[in-house]
Image (cartoon, rainbow, N blue to C red):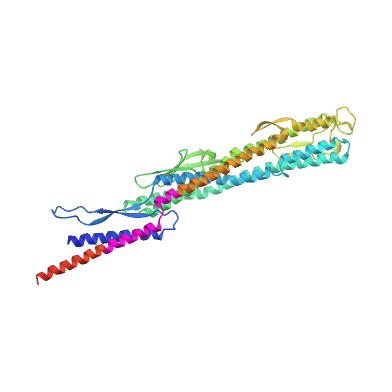
Amino acid sequence: MSITYNALSGALAAQAAIATVSQNLANSQTKGYTRQGVLLQSNVADFSRNSPGNGVTVGALLRFSDSYKSQQMWRSNSELGQRAQTQPYLTQLEKVMNDPTSSISYGFDNFFKALNAAAVDPTSTPLRQQVISSGDALSKQINSIYNLAANQKLSTQQQSSAILPSLNDSLASIAALNSKIQQVGANGTNTSALIDQRELLIDEVSSQVGVEVVYGPDGSASVSLKSGQPLVAADVAANLSYSSAGGEQTLNLSFAGTRFVLDDSKIGGKLGGLANFRTNTLAPLQQSIADIAQQFSSMFNAQQESGDKTDGAPGTAMFTFDPTSTTGLLKVNEGFTTADLAFAERGQPAGDNSNLQALIAIRGKPITVASVGSVLLGDADTQLVGKLAIESQQNQSQLKTATTVRQQAEDDWKSTSAVNVDEEGISLIEFQNMYQANMKVISVANNLFDATLQMFN
């Protein structure tokens, strides 16, 4: 009977292996599926002197997974999410600010050209009107760039808020799967499909924030931010939310009754990329544009007020700078006319252009800009555009690198965990042959048994 038992155990083991191969082939195109295999173990021999053994058994179902490769894939996904989320905003800013007809530099060029043209005939009404028109155009160009940055800030805030519901749902699902994996695994049931679902969710979370994952002996996965704050522990999930104060967003994390205030510019992933862009690109850019507008208007107005109008009256301010205005930082004062331009030096007759020359010279005066330091007024915008271009190019380079690293990480994961149809096909034939061979042994054992019976007839 030992022959029949050995062959039967071999046939059953082959059936289990073939069933596992069929599961792999059925899921060869399933995203995130980790291939499985059977661990065949020889049953130990009994204490009979001449017993070769007691057949074979399926010791365990194997899940071909490498946690190191999974961690690498998740880390690369976080970097990719951060760089990819930022680039469209950088590209838009760079394109608009560097446009030859809409840039701040173009506005300054036209404004000071109009002032230079007026120097030919300081009393010419058309030439003086051109100064006011180009000043108004300059104001609108400054306001347009500033408003673009403000709109991008609003868009990134809205985009960040829109990410949170999906992120919180994923964290809750990971916690629920942890609980289910513990329950199912305790009964000895295969948990591979549940683990695959959980790892897909972790991969999704990793694109939104940078994560670290630690596996427990009970099969649960603990997920945390790189800075250590917990996102999932066993069956408990964190909840992330934004609170607003003074137009600024603050990211909060609540976990098991404990509240953390996070610096979202340092958490990685899409959320970190958007927050980093707001904090380290948009905020300095907005402040720099405001610095240019404020210092230019202050210098121009002061010089205007030191000269005389065509009627001999003291000059008045041409521009108003208002950082709280909803319509724009800078504007030409309402009712300001060509007669209000104070081109003459104080006490000089109409036609004198001494103060006009001083107004023209403002372009070469230094100002202090938040993100570039001390710079000549005429060079300030060029410096900003250059800094933005460098930042955009660096992000593009990092995005390209992150894309490559992510692809390599996926390929490494697939080399261990993905289904190779050719390899599974070979395994299918091998286990089919194993099954047929064991069935042949059972047939031989039956023939021997029948022959033995005939000996007693």
Magenta span contains residue 419: yes
Main SS of the magenta segment? helix
Q: Position of residue 400 (x, y in %)?
A: 54, 45
In the depicted view, which residue is nearer to us: 160 or 351?
A: 351
Tell me, yes or no, whether the highlighted magenta stretch contains residue 249.
Answer: no
Nearer the observer, 70 or 163: 70
Task: Examine the rendering and report whether any part of residue 324 can be seen.
Answer: yes
Residue 410: x, y in percent?
46, 49
Q: Tell me residue 164's x, y (percent).
A: 52, 47
Q: Which residues are magenta?
A: 411-436
Q: In this picture, is 33 found above or below 263?
A: below
Q: Quadrant of the N terminus?
A: bottom left
Residue 241 in the image, given as x and y percentages of width and height: 52, 44
**Of 297 and 178, which appears nearest the observer?**
297
Q: Is residue 433 left or right of residue 296?
A: left
The answer to whether 372 appears left or right of 10 in the picture is right
Q: Residue pushed farthest top? A: 347
From the image, which quarter does the C terminus lie in?
bottom left
